[in-house]
Amino acid sequence: MMTFVKAHETVRPADVAAHYGIASNDAARILGHLADRGLVARIKRGVYTADRELARRVLSAKLDSLMATL
């Protein structure tokens, strides 16, 4: 599954499920486990990436947005 995630900028559980022929909830659970282990990053609800730079940019933008509200 890591090969599939790395081959795409972002993936959703439905993408993984369609590719591997598994249920979306199973794909979501597996992606969640990969995120918990730090192998992929959850960049927003239901969207994952293995691209560390993309994850860093998304996190930085979220932090900037939060800081602007203070």
Image (cartoon, grey):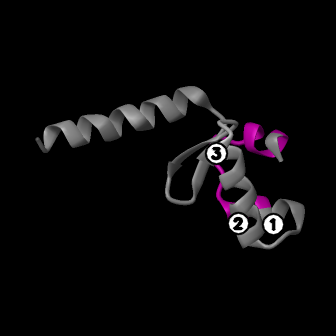
* Residue occupied by mark 2: 14
Query: Which region of the structure is painted magenta?
Result: 3-16
- Front position in the image: 8 or 17: 17
Q: Amino acid at mark 2?
A: Ala
Number of the front mark, 2 or 3? 3
Instruction: Say what secondary structure mark 1 lies in.
Output: helix
The residue wearing badge 3 is 36
**Up-down relation of residue 23 to residue 33 (above or below):** below
- Amino acid type at circle 1 is Ala
Q: Which quarter of the image is occupied by the C terminus?
A: top left
The residue drawn where x is 70% and y is 66% is: 14
How far apart are the two marked residues, 1 and 2, measured between alpha carbons? 6 Å
Q: Amino acid at mark 3?
A: Asp
Label 1 crowding class (10 Å Cα cut-off): few <14, some 14-19, many 20+? few
| Residue 30 x, y percent position in the rendering | 75, 56
- What residue is drawn where x is 59% and y is 28%? 52
Q: How many marks?
A: 3
Query: How far apart are labels 2 and 3 at the CA level?
Result: 19 Å
The residue carrying mark 1 is 18
Q: Residue at x 88, y 68 (%)?
A: 21
